[in-house]
Image: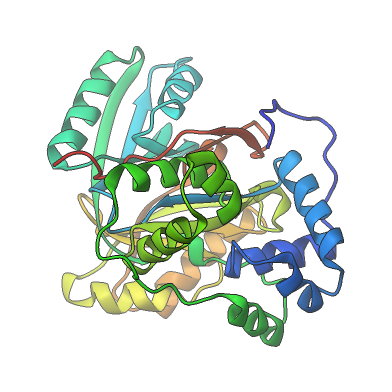
Amino acid sequence: MNTREASTQVRSLDDTDRRLIHALQINPRARWAAIAPIIGVDSVTLARRWERLTDDGLAWVAGHPGAEARGPSAILEVGAEPGATLQIASALAADPEAFTVDHTAGGRDLLVMVGASDLNSLSEYIMGRMRRLEGVRATRTHILSSPFTDAGQWRLRALSAGEATAVERTAVASVATRARVDEQLEHELLQILGRDGRATVAAIARSLGIGQRRIRETLATLSARGRLVVRTEIARAHSGWPVHAWYFLRVPAAMANRVGSAITRLSEVRLAVSTIGPYNLVLSVWMKTLADVQRLEVAIEESVHGVSIADRSVVLRSLKKEGMQVNAQGMATGVMVPLPTSLLHG
């Protein structure tokens, strides 16, 4: 993927593109030969299509630290002085700790997802970084507690149920075959897969000067132990769900798990996570129109007794998405800022 700026001419996704992206959401490292019969085109055509999609920044695959390799995370609301929002957002988008940066309308100017190796480091980043940035007027922090679903489980819904199942069968279950994984190797693998989540075992082995068997076994072990996750992303404006909103919910504590699980069944929900802060459940949703923001809010409150949506924000622009810097159209720039991990911190 080449580093790119905002483009004024970008082709639309056709049905085959969407089917390909959906397949890679299910199995991001699938072999072209394995999924070609399911999508209905030959493997060479699939490879060329994927190259065009990534070159245009419309879709990309990236490896990230899994839940067991990450430290604590938080949602940070940032209020900016007039005229300072873009400057602050651009600065934060260059930070590894700020893995998602959204410019929003509503009760906050920016909504930033941040992570660090431990709570002390998280506190130091939030307090120290905000103090050093000119134009920051106010901040509010919500510590993430328990995720009910994340964007890696969201699907484009371009394949039929049968086709999706067939793609699932192409994935090889990861088994931890190595008792111990070298921390430096783990770090290097995360760096490589962060740039290209579809990098082949052979290419990784050549890059690191390590045998393919060791690379293959290490990747399987990291995946099985929850230290590595590979995700396929799509530029939101081209997904069919161009409107992005955040909802902040208050739910009775005794109902939080049931409500969180129920809400994940809504097709618009990409992230549902319990939080420690003014609200105890936060949702990130993609929708087809702005009118759907209020419609979904009503549907949630009517269908789930006891839920109160206390606040909401519509995303005007994203500057960074799970480590990938994106341009004004939401397309990948090719600049991946690796996410922080708990590695090398004791």
Q: Is residue 50 above or below residue 157?
A: above
Q: Is residue 128 above or below residue 49?
A: above
Q: In this view, does 109 lie to the left or right of 205?
A: left
The percent coordinates of residue 18 (x first, y second) are 76, 63
Q: In this view, does 308 lie to the left or right of 330?
A: left
Please name whichever residue, 200 or 48, is drawn nearer the observer in this view of the structure: 200
Q: Residue 225 sits in which quadrant?
A: bottom left
The image's colouring method is rainbow
Q: Identify the residue at horizontal 48%, vertical 68% (top origin).
A: 298
Q: Quadrant of the C terminus?
A: top left
Q: In this view, does 42 lie to the left or right of 73?
A: right
Q: In which quarter of the image is the N terminus?
A: top right
Q: Is residue 204 visible?
A: yes
Q: Residue placed farthest to the bottom in the image?
A: 162
Q: Residue 288 sits in which quadrant?
A: bottom right
Q: Is residue 265 left or right of residue 68?
A: right
Q: Identify the residue at horizontal 75%, vertical 40% (top origin).
A: 55
Q: Is residue 135 above or below residue 273?
A: above
Please name whichever residue, 33 or 8, is drawn nearer the observer in this view of the structure: 33
Q: Is residue 327 above or below residue 150?
A: above
